[in-house]
Amino acid sequence: MRSTGLVRTGAPWVKEVTIMQSSLIGKIEKAKRYAQETDRVTFYEFSVKFRGDNNDYDASYKDGKWHCSCHFFSSWGLCSHTMALEKILASMLPPEALTTQYDASITVD
């Protein structure tokens, strides 16, 4: 039953609509709290379309391993796409998925 915003005094459906709205409001509030507590979520498998600078790539994490359709990944087993996903999802990945150490002080001569 959907509320129309109109309430008739003494109508038998008013209590049901009020309970439904109250329940939904409670779930919305809980969802907001959960969204802030990302440590509650752990991804064990997922796939995404990653829009790179030159092309779109399919990146995924499955069976404890990263995968990406870009050429660099096929040679190195990691790439900017998988490293970015590690950084974005760090608090929501299992420890074994965090393979990259980010060190901004690294320089290449």
Image (cartoon, helix red, strand yellow):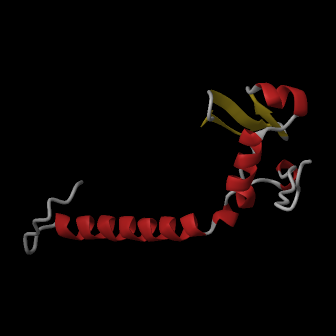
Residue at 84% across, 26% down: 74
Q: Is residue 104 above or below residue 85?
A: below
Residue at 55% across, 64% down: 35
Residue 103: image quadrant is bottom right
Residue at 88% across, 54% down: 107
Residue 80: image quadrant is top right
Q: Residue 52: x percent and y percent?
A: 63, 35
Quarter of the image that includes the N terminus: bottom left
Residue 77: image quadrant is top right
Q: Nearer the viewer, residue 74 or 1?
A: 74
- Count of numbered circles on the image: 0
Q: Residue 6: x percent and y percent?
A: 10, 65
Q: Would you say 19 lies left or right of 96 here?
A: left
Q: Would you say 91 lies left or right of 13 here?
A: right
Q: Nearer the viewer, residue 82 or 109?
A: 109
Which residue extends farthest left?
Answer: 8
Q: Nearer the viewer, residue 49 or 9?
A: 49
Which residue extends farthest right?
Answer: 109
Q: Nearer the viewer, residue 62 or 109?
A: 109
Q: Residue 83: x percent and y percent?
A: 77, 46
Residue at 86% across, 51% down: 100
Which residue extends farthest bottom?
Answer: 9
Q: Would you say 106 lies left or right of 53 here?
A: right
Q: Is residue 25 above or below residue 95?
A: below
Q: Residue 40: x percent and y percent?
A: 67, 64
